[in-house]
Amino acid sequence: MFIIDTDHVNLLEWGSGAIGQRLHERIRGLPEGEVATTIISFEEQTRGWLAFQARARTIEQQVTAYRKLNRHLNIYCEIDVLEFDTEAAAEFERLRREDRRDRAHLQGNSAYQESERLQQST
């Protein structure tokens, strides 16, 4: 199973460029039911579209906002959405701990330290 994140869902929803087209082609080549996203991606995008709709001041802006919100809904009706259950939460915590260990290991690396210093100075 391929689990796509929020950025990939955005590309599917709005990506008309080369990257979006490649993603569409790749997904079309997969067996039905092999692609899913998460409820977290749905929540992130829904918050964004509701904020977009709330900022609409004219009737034209409202029509556009509701059209985009409806398109968002339709995308999620066409794809399996995975729950964030206790098993997913446990895996998330495991990955977070692993990431912390990896970062701690990298912090002893002088190239990593220089990279971090340069990022902070910009």
Image: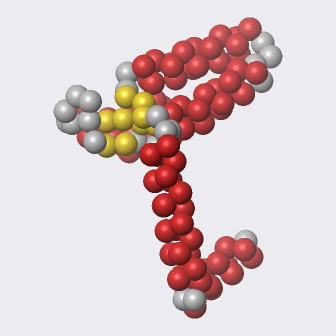
Measured as percent of width and height from the top left, residue 118 is found at: 67, 79
The x, y position of residue 12, in whole percent, is 41, 33
Q: Quadrant of residue 119?
A: bottom right
In the image, residue 23 above or below residue 108? above
- Which residue is the extreme one toward the front? 86
Label total for image: 0
Query: Which is more toward the observer, 98 or 4?
Result: 98
Q: Position of residue 44 (x, y in %)?
A: 60, 36
**In the shown orientation, is residue 122 left or right of residue 102?**
right
* Residue 16 visible in the snapshot: no
Q: Nearer the viewer, residue 3 or 21?
A: 3
Quadrant of res 28: top left
Q: Is residue 30 visible?
A: yes
Q: Residue at x 65, y 10 (%)?
A: 63
Q: How is the image coloured?
A: secondary structure
Q: Position of residue 93 (x, y in %)?
A: 53, 57
Q: Quadrant of the C terminus?
A: bottom right
Residue in the image at 45% along x and 46% along y:
87
Quadrant, the N terminus: top left
Q: Residue at x 72, y 27 (%)?
A: 51
Residue depicted at 51% across the width and 19% down the height: 73
